[in-house]
Image (tube, rainbow, N blue to C red):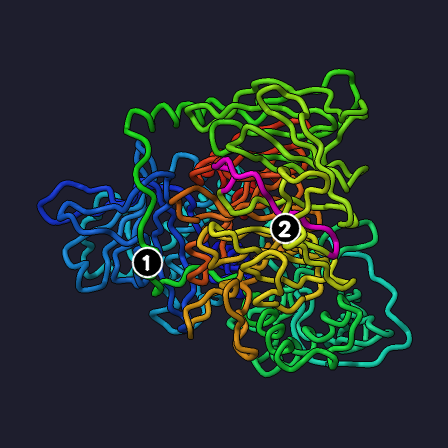
Amino acid sequence: MNVFKSLGRLIWGDESNPELVQITSGQFYIHKPSRPRECIYIDSMATIRRTSQPHQYILAINRVFEEGEGDLQDESGEELDDEKVFLIDGAMQFRKVVASTGTSFTWQGLASEDAGMEYEFVCDDETTAFTVNNFEITAYQCMYERKHQKSHINAEEEAIEEFEIKSRKPKPASKASTSKTSTKASKSASAARIKKEKESVQHEESEEEFDAQEIDKPALRTMPTNSEAVVDVDGELNLFDARTNLFMIQADDVRCRLVRAGKFSYWLIVTAKDGAQQLAQPLEPRMNPVFSQQHLSFIWNYFDDQHNVFSWLIRFKDTTTLSKFQGSFGECMYEAINKEAWSKVSDVDQKYMIKTYQDDVEMKDADSSSQYSSDEEEEEEKYYSDEEEEDKAKYDEDESEEEEETFIPSGGDGAKNSQLAVGYKDRSFVVRGNKIGVFKHNDRDGLDFSTTIKNLSNKKGREVNPSTVLLHEQDTAMVMIDPRDLDTAYKMDLEYGKIVEEWSMPGTSGVLNLVADSKYSHLTDNKTMIGLSKEAMFRIDPRLSGSKIVDSEFKQYAKGNEFTAAATTANGSLAVAGAKGDIKLLNVVGKNAKTALPALGDPILGLDVTGNGRWVIATCKNYILLIDVLNPENKKLGFDASFPAKAKPTPIKLHLKPEHVAAMKQPVSFTPARFNTGVNEEEKTIVTSTGPYVITWNFRRVKNGHYDYQIKQYSDNIVADNFKFGQDRSIIVALPHDVTALPKRNLTSPTEALDQARKKK
């Protein structure tokens, strides 16, 4: 078996992924002339990536941030970049070094500023031999392609192996008369060694070759009999294989059609050239579509009748074909979701929606040439001293997911956790039926169970089961709504653990949501708050006699708004969203909105806003919208002034990669996404969850166009999650029967996390 060809099949198969191979953890060093070795990144990852130029690749070393770290500096006091990039070329003297202390890679940079310096990446102890060998061989393949300007796939092993530099002692020079024979023998012996090593690693890691025909495929659906073609293009069909984390070709020449099967009913149908069906499925939101202009591809999820998840990829022949299919797909998907003709949407809103579908759906990876903007280069200040950091690390190592804090209700009523409220002081609260679990934050960013407040009941003795809770008055009180009585709010004194007030709110058609007057008003003694019903928003003042609704700040909207979520900024501006996906921005409660953003059709389940009001994050079931509401022309926020009709902000669409959804084996269902929060604390991270997975995005990287994310899997579905107040190092996670504090550092890349989960099974 040709080792390099077999590796190429595993590593190079998915051209839509710029990353060929990655080592996720290690230390990065630099060797300067006449100076001791210097550690540049204490924790880093090494990645071999494609570039926009054919047959040209880069080795990128990225710093992985520990929470509380500040900017790194070299010995001269100059700040160091968070990424160091090297062009992969045979001249870089790249080699693998295996020693008793571990495995490392060393090389020389080719740029002028790298003259005389050698770099070293030391792999983490947990890096497998399989990963190390894949990384090494991929580097040689990249060198071959750069030198010969052609694919390595058909190259002989010896032609690629010529780039290998031995880390052992150099062999004595051969005599001229025997050099040809010696060289040939050396190459053959080395090839045999590499092949044997590779086969040994494959056996150790239980890796094997997977034929495309062996991939589990969904059963074919019956195609609609009466349909009208909307678009018909050619492409190549691929199916994601979770065993190899690669897309495998299923058919290299297929017809991809979008057809209209009825009013607002559309299907995607893929057939072979002879007419044989490859797949057929109706267009629906959970398809999670991703288009890549760079890689001429369309990736999406397919759910069969047994709710199994698959990820398909179609690769198109050129950008014209992709654009034609993509434009039609956006229109068909809009009609399928909204049950409304695309032609009825205004030209302005059409352009807004098309940009959302097309410009921001690609899951971009970090570009080697990009830099953070100057106002985003500040890193977190160092929080832990060296001694504290060691204690924290020891704590994290000892902490087990199976030993998380648990609070179990007495009486065996079978209730489960339903709501989470994170206090700004040192406590978090979890609602379970008519009980509230109280957890104290310890000095290690963990949680300790404190007590359970039991038997919540109103004045008549009927138990209260909160569906909405809001911390109030410096976390001394909690205001709650019981879904069985939506015209009443209950105020509980958290010190006494009893409901002490009942607030009447008639005429609202049922209060569904409560939000603070401003983002940080719960840090004060402020008494008022904002309420939301399906068709109205209003201010609540418990100091009023009788009805607690402030008449002058009550706004009744026409039917059809169906408000679902709200959030406030630090100065009290308000964002509200509805079941159709529209978002309204106001600076005064009870007045008309200053800005109304068009609906994409999916209900918005949660809203959050940065303290300064510039960024709004809206959570839908399958994706998250991140919107910059600062008008670049007049420098005003959408809360204070309307956007020009032709200049509405385009959302960034955050979602999971379809292949990751397929590996998760369940549809996406996001919990409300949130920023980390705190007075004078910059928003740096976004957190949400779906099923048993906690997911975070680096907010600063997202703003620069890099949408990579990290995940952590639990043994049960997650009910709610939020950051500990004042920082983003610790995430409070509520499971149906457990509550835990998750250190953000414990999240990993999706590929690594899902691969580990697959191996455990």
The structure residue drawn at horizontal position 39% and vertical position 26%, both measured from the top left corner, is 392
Q: Quadrant of residue 122?
A: top left
Q: Quadrant of residue 213?
A: bottom right
Other residues around mark 2 within 10 Å, as few (<14) / some (14–19) / many (≥20): many
Q: What's the mark number on residue 606? A: 2
Relative placement, left or right, of 314 versus 412 is left
Magenta residues? 521-535
Mark 2 element type: strand
Residue type of the residue flagged with mark 2: Gly
Looking at the rendering, in which quadrant would you find the C terminus? top right
Q: What's the mark number on residue 170? A: none
Give the CA separation, mark 2 to mark 1: 28 Å
Nearest the eye: 385 or 619: 619
Q: Position of residue 435 (x, y in %)?
A: 70, 24
Residue type of the residue flagged with mark 1: Asp
**Considering only vertical position in the picture, is 735 above or below 755?**
above
Nearest the eye: 606 or 155: 606
Relative placement, left or right, of 57 versus 172 is right
- Say which residue label 1 marks: 375
